[in-house]
Amino acid sequence: MGRHVPHLLVQYDWDQDTLGVSGDQVHHLEKVLRLAPGDEVSYTNGRGTVGTGVYGDGRIVRDHEVTVPRPSPLTMAVAPPASRDRCRFLVEKLSELGVARLVWLSTSRGEGRIPHVGKTTLWAVSALEQSRGGWLIEVGTAFVAWGDLDRPLLVAVPGGDSEVLEVRTVAIGPEGGLDPAEIPADAASIDLGSTILRVETAAVVAASRFSRPWHGG
């Protein structure tokens, strides 16, 4: 079996022939993965450029690079789960699925809190590197109101029966469910199954179903 090739998010030094990596990345590459000078790595800027090169002395010597399309333009609007671990699961799995954005939906019954931006950034970067992606998911830092969500909007609710063709945003409510009165009149609805799913499970199911390129205007 060939050696594992690390995949790194590098967001600076892209105007040079070599890319600098952070101190934490150097420690992981050299102390944990035992990389030696000249070993192969892959890398991305998190905005669609993916490349391969070789590592040495805290830098990556750039080689072949390509631009990859964003897997999906989908935004997931989710009432934050009650625990940090469940929020982490949500961020990581939506990142792995190629979702473009995660925003935290303000709902009348929601009780969860938005995780600290430092944590969500670490989770998103880790998931990007693990999944060898080229696009870093954008994670919101404040609650978003229904009226600020991009349309077409789809809301996951028990009994939803819309036949959805195109969608830009999928909304997932809190533990106690959504108040029907708060759901916008222009939103379509979808039922995700015969059982009541946890917030993060519902978000992953919905993202798996609808995270595909949209060709509308």
Image (tube, rainbow, N blue to C red):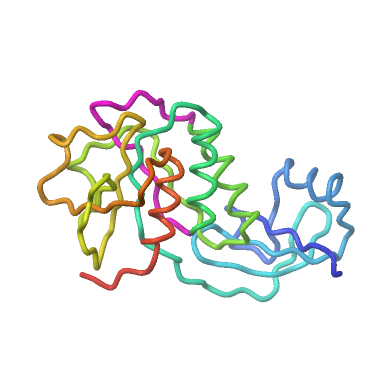
Q: Is residue 22 above or below residue 80?
A: below
**Residue positioned 86% across, 56% down in the render:** 35
Residue closer to the observer: 23 or 31: 31
The magenta stretch is 98-116
Q: Identify whether 143 is placed above or below 211.
A: above
Q: Quadrant of residue 80?
A: top left
Left or right of 210: which side holds 121? Answer: right
Quadrant that contains the C terminus: bottom left
Q: Nearer the viewer, residue 62 or 134?
A: 134
110 to 134, vertically: above or below: above
Give the residue at the far left of this rendering: 185
Taking the spot 43% from the left edge, 32% from the top edge, the residue there is: 81
Q: Count of labels shown?
A: 0
Q: Is residue 78 above or below residue 15?
A: above
Q: Position of residue 101 (x, y in %)?
A: 39, 50
Magenta stretch holds residue 87? no
87 left or right of 143 in image? right
Who is closer to the viewer here, 139 or 50? 139
Residue displayed at 43% across by 56% down:
99
Of 54 and 75, nearer the camera is 75
Residue 105, quarter of picture? top left
For the stretch drawn in magenta, the main secondary structure is loop
Q: x, y (%) of residue 12? A: 59, 53
Location of residue 209 in the rendering, given as x and y in whole percent from the top left corner: 39, 61
Residue at left 62%, top 56%? 13
**Which quadrant is the N terminus positioned in?**
bottom right
